[in-house]
Amino acid sequence: MKVLTVADREMPELLEKPELTRGVRLILSCGDLAPEYLARLRSFINADLYYVPGNHDIRYQQSPPMGCTDLSCKIITTHGLAILGLPGSRWYNGGVHQYHESEMRSMIRRIFISPANYFARWRKPLDIVFAHAPPRHIHDAEDRCHRGFRCFNTLIKKYRPRYFIHGHIHALFGRNADRITDVGPTRVINSYGYHVFEIEPVSPEQPA
């Protein structure tokens, strides 16, 4: 199944060239994109779109992307995939969707003890975690705003998702491989701009 991930930079070609997104059934937005852009993407591609806010998404509360679903701090099973969304960046000036390391760690802890997530969590392993910020020391930077979260590294080590998708780190990639780092069985992808990949659902009886 084809998945389109987007983050940080609007890419007009996604709304102009159907061949770029042909066959996409799921869109994941890693943040810092206008709600109107996400709504147009969902409509143009005609696929389910889930999003998490980035540190610049101050309009989402008043004007959420129409027809799209906020997956912040939630686990769902859709298209045969177990998916977790994590919002925001590291705290740097007190704006919305900014979190200290301890706050993000507590948010993740609450997710995994929440009765609302119990069925999704235990039915099958996590397939995709998508967040705005990266894990610490994987694609991140050293300024306060762009440091990754250490608790994301712990999450990857403990739950071993097949993919960890993030945005927030602006970079230009000469080839897709430049945006990818493998951490054990987890493929970490910087989704700045957009990225398309294929993933097949894995039944609970099959190893990931």
Image (tube, rainbow, N blue to C red):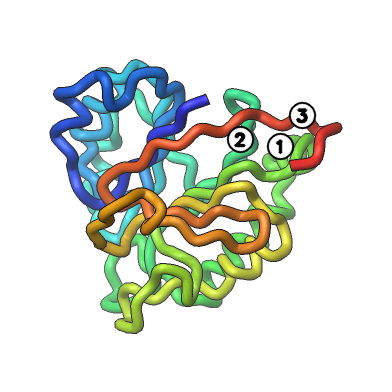
Quadrant location of the C terminus? top right
Q: Are marks 3 and 2 in contact (CB under 8 Å)?
A: no
Q: Which residue is mark 1?
A: 120
Amino acid type at circle 2 is: Ile
Sequence-first disc among 1 and 3: 1
| Amino acid type of the residue that numbered disc 3 sits on in the rendered structure | Ser
Looking at the picture, which amino acid does disc 1 mark? Ala
Disc 1 + disc 3, Cβ < 8 Å: no
Q: Which mark is residue 36?
A: none
Residue 149 vs residue 22, the one in the foreground: 22
The mark nearer the N terminus, 3 or 2, is: 2
Q: Residues within 10 Å of mark 3 (few under 14, many from 20)?
A: few
Q: Position of residue 15 (x, y in %)?
A: 18, 26
Please name the residue shown 64% across and 61% down the image. 156
What kind of element bears circle 3? Answer: loop
Residue 76 numbered mark, or none:
2
In this rendering, is residue 69 above or below 126? above
Secondary structure beneath disc 2?
strand
Classify 10 Å Cα crowding around label 1: few (below 14), some (14-19), many (20 and above): many
Tag in front: 1 or 3: 3
Residue found at x 59% / y 27%: 78
- Reading the image, the residue beneath label 3 is 203
Q: Earlier in the sequence, mark 1 or mark 2?
A: 2
Q: CA distance from mark 3 to mark 2?
A: 15 Å
Counting from the top left corner in percent of width and height, residue 171 is at 25, 62
Q: Please report contact status of discs 1 and 2: CB closer than 8 Å, yes or no.
A: yes
CA–CA distance in space, label 1 to label 2: 6 Å
